[in-house]
Amino acid sequence: MRALVIAPQPFFSPRGTPFSVYYRTMVEAQLGLKIDLLTYGQGQDVDLPGVRIIRIPRFKFLGPVRVGPSWLKLFLNVFLLSWTVALLVRNRYDVVHAHEESVFFARYLRPIFRFKLIYDMHSSLPQQLTNFSFTRSRLLIGLFGWFESVALEKSDAVITICPELAEYAEPRMPDPSRHFLIENSIFDEVRLKSPEDAVPPTPDPAATPPGRALVVYAGTFEAYQGLELLIRAFSAAHARRPEAFLLLVGGNSGQIERLRALANARGLQGHCHFTGRVPQALAQWYARKAAVQTSPRITGSNTPLKIYEQLASGIPLLATRIPSHTQVVDDRVCFLVEPSERAMAEGLEAALTDTARREQVVAAARELYRRRYSREVYEQKMQSLIESVT
């Protein structure tokens, strides 16, 4: 079976692009699909056997493609549409696997070229417009909502990545049996094609000072991630646990400057370090050095991809009690706290010092991952998806 995968993102970009496209495509190829993957010009080439990567022009002068909605993405998606039509004219595809907003145009090409359409719904796109402060226009948000509803109605199969998104999507589908909840729960190392890109980056010694208990956050620095709350809570916890050290991995220069000012105002000079954006392998290396890993999100309903790796890591996780987290984790598998400064500070102190609870949480987290989110479970779900469209 031949498939066209459409990925409106810089594939592959370990400094900000979601990893879900890589893992979905990798497993689809391992299950026997012959795949053409159409994506943006930006990104690094990866080694994916059975996958041919096709890129639109890079347009480097327009700057990098950032996470979330943007006018640049809208511009690039015009070219993505043109390349999609050209590929469909030249090739016979049994399946088109459209990630995120690419389903908006793939849905209209489906009856013309007679392929089965898989909609990979990473999030609710109307919600993204507000979460990333892209627009407050009710007209634009409503238009995206209509596009999304039509895509859910007309696709042959729909993938959602977390229970709350599944609950949002299923009532909008005429046939809920076409829905597949497939969490982004595997985290194999990404294999880059260029040897120079694959050289492991050197860790910053200042990020892991000896004798300190690392409290680690790794991810984007968008407002919804709750990093201001984490810094304030850590400063309170640090007053009682002076051996603790806060390591923040990610962010651009403007975001880091703003958060560093907050950390300094809280007296955390010498007790907090910002690495900036780093490749996946280095972020994972820092995470493995943690005494406590954190996910301090304050809003949102999509489960962070990193949660699954954190569950399997053998390192205690502190997370906020919001839908992003509670649809996957509970008090048995992590230190779950209210998104407030006091609650998070107390949770950090407990996660650093309560040895018995730490051991219980780690054991339960690993068992949960093995039972519900392991690679074996992921592959079984992907196999069921492929069988549904063949």
Image (cartoon, rainbow, N blue to C red):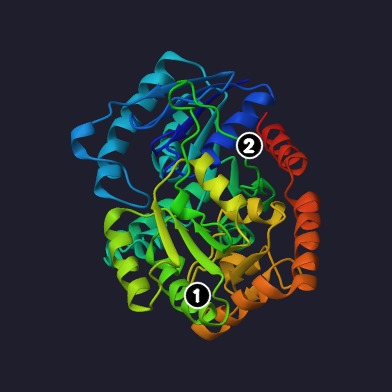
Q: Is residue 84 above or below residue 17?
A: above
Q: Quadrant of residue 262?
A: bottom left
The one of 124 and 255 positioned closer to us in this rendering: 255
Count of numbered circles in the view? 2
Please, what secondary structure does the residue beneath circle 1 have? helix
Residue 183: image location, x then y, percent: 64, 50
Residue closer to the observer: 133 or 5: 133
Q: Amino acid at mark 2?
A: Asp
| Residue visible at 40% across and 17% down in the picture | 89
Question: Badge 1, how many Cα within 10 Å: few under 14, some, many 20+?
Answer: many
* Residue ID at (46%, 45%): 100
Q: Which residue is mark 2?
A: 188
Q: Position of residue 167 (x, y in %)?
A: 61, 63
Q: Quadrant of the N terminus?
A: top right
Q: Residue at x 38, y 69 (%)?
A: 269
Residue 30 in percent (x, y) is at 67, 25
Q: Residue furthest top?
A: 90
Of 152 and 97, the residue lying toward us: 97
Q: Quadrant of residue 378?
A: top right
Relative height, residue 246 to residue 342 (above, below):
above
Query: Which residue position is annotated with label 1?
Result: 234
From where the camera sits, is residue 47 visible? Answer: yes
Q: Residue furthest left?
A: 61
Name which residue type carries label 1: Phe
Q: Position of residue 283 (x, y in %)?
A: 51, 47
Regarding mark 2 in the picture, which secondary structure is present there? loop
Residue 209 located left or right of residue 267: right
